[in-house]
Amino acid sequence: MPDVDSSIDVEMPPGTEVILTIGVAFEAWDGLPMTKMAMTPEFPEEAKRLGKTDWTSVSWYEYGATTGLPRLARVFDELDVKVSLSTSARAVELYPDLANQLVRSGHELVGHGYSQSQRMFLLDEEQDLAEVRRCTAILEKLTGVRPVGWSSQGGQRGDHTVSSLLREGYRYCKDFRHSDVPVVVGRDGDRKLIAMPRMDEVNDAVLFRRFGAPPSVFVEIFQRGFDQVRSEVTDQPRIVSVTLHPTYYGRPFGVSALRECVEYARRHPNVWICRRRDAAAHFQRVLD
């Protein structure tokens, strides 16, 4: 169980009723992506055994960085929003110009492991720390900015990930799903690791890829969640989020969903649309 300190009062920033964070995947694989994740015909097992390359899946995923994410970046500018990108270090190695453009535009790169080929829950203590350090070092070296937030591949942390993040100076993690409000999930002396809430249900990889739902469903679920959170009478923080994958909602049909969610949130007063690191910094100050 996480080290949750439920006795801490986590107040919202003055004048803020709801916080909205926008998460975007900036991912890459070692070698070829998993064919079952792409919206393309399944590559035959016989072809795999013969060592053939599923170029359809490769090009499907390359679309995310070459076309989808640049399109989304233009939409971010048009909407005047800053986002948090769960970033594979391998993606920054492959697309350094894009990564630096995003950083210069004020967006946040969140540690996301070296590549999507790895999973933290398979690693022992030494390997887990090495994975965190490798990703962190590459992001800092190639962009000049050291990440303060972490999202494990697939959002699936391992037994030792919290300890590794604390050792490397991370301030927040988005691998936890047990609370709608920020909670402390690890401590190292005076330093704390905060779990930032996530709304997995407003995620194009879930709704579109897994269930084939159209963007209208994405928007409806966001609006229903936003309305409920805003209506709840509570002293606890009210936080909503959306998650986009450029290979899915970076396509022409998908960007409309982001527009509609942001425009809907802005119809209401006292909504703070920010990067996760900004929200986490506030809660770190409150928790000190």
Image (cartoon, rainbow, N blue to C red):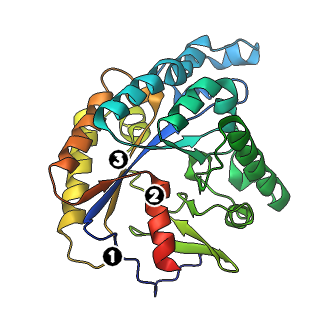
Front residue of 118/261: it is 261
Answer with left or right where residue 152 lies relative to residue 282.
Answer: right
- Height in image: 158 above or below 43? below
The Cα atoms of the two marked residues, 3 and 1, are separated by 21 Å
Q: Residues within 10 Å of mark 3 (few under 14, many from 20)?
A: many
**Callout 2, which amino acid?**
Asp
Q: For residue 9, which quarter of the picture? A: bottom left
Label 1 crowd (10 A; few <14 / some 14-19 / many >=20) = some
Return the residue at label 3. 202
The one nearer the camera, 131 or 266, is 266
Q: Which mark is residue 278?
A: 2
Residue 140, position as x, y percentages in the image:
70, 43
Dot 3 lies on which element?
A: loop
Residue 102 is situated, as x and y percent measured from the top left of the image, at 51, 33
Question: In the rendering, which numbered label is found on residue 169?
Answer: none
Q: For this view, does 130 lie left or right of residue 185?
A: right
Amino acid identity at mark 1: Gln
Please tell me whether mark 3 or mark 2 is closer to you in this view: 2
> Which residue type does callout 3 highlight?
Val
The one nearer the camera, 263 or 231, is 263
Q: Residue furthest right?
A: 126
Q: Between tags 3 and 1, which lies in front?
A: 1
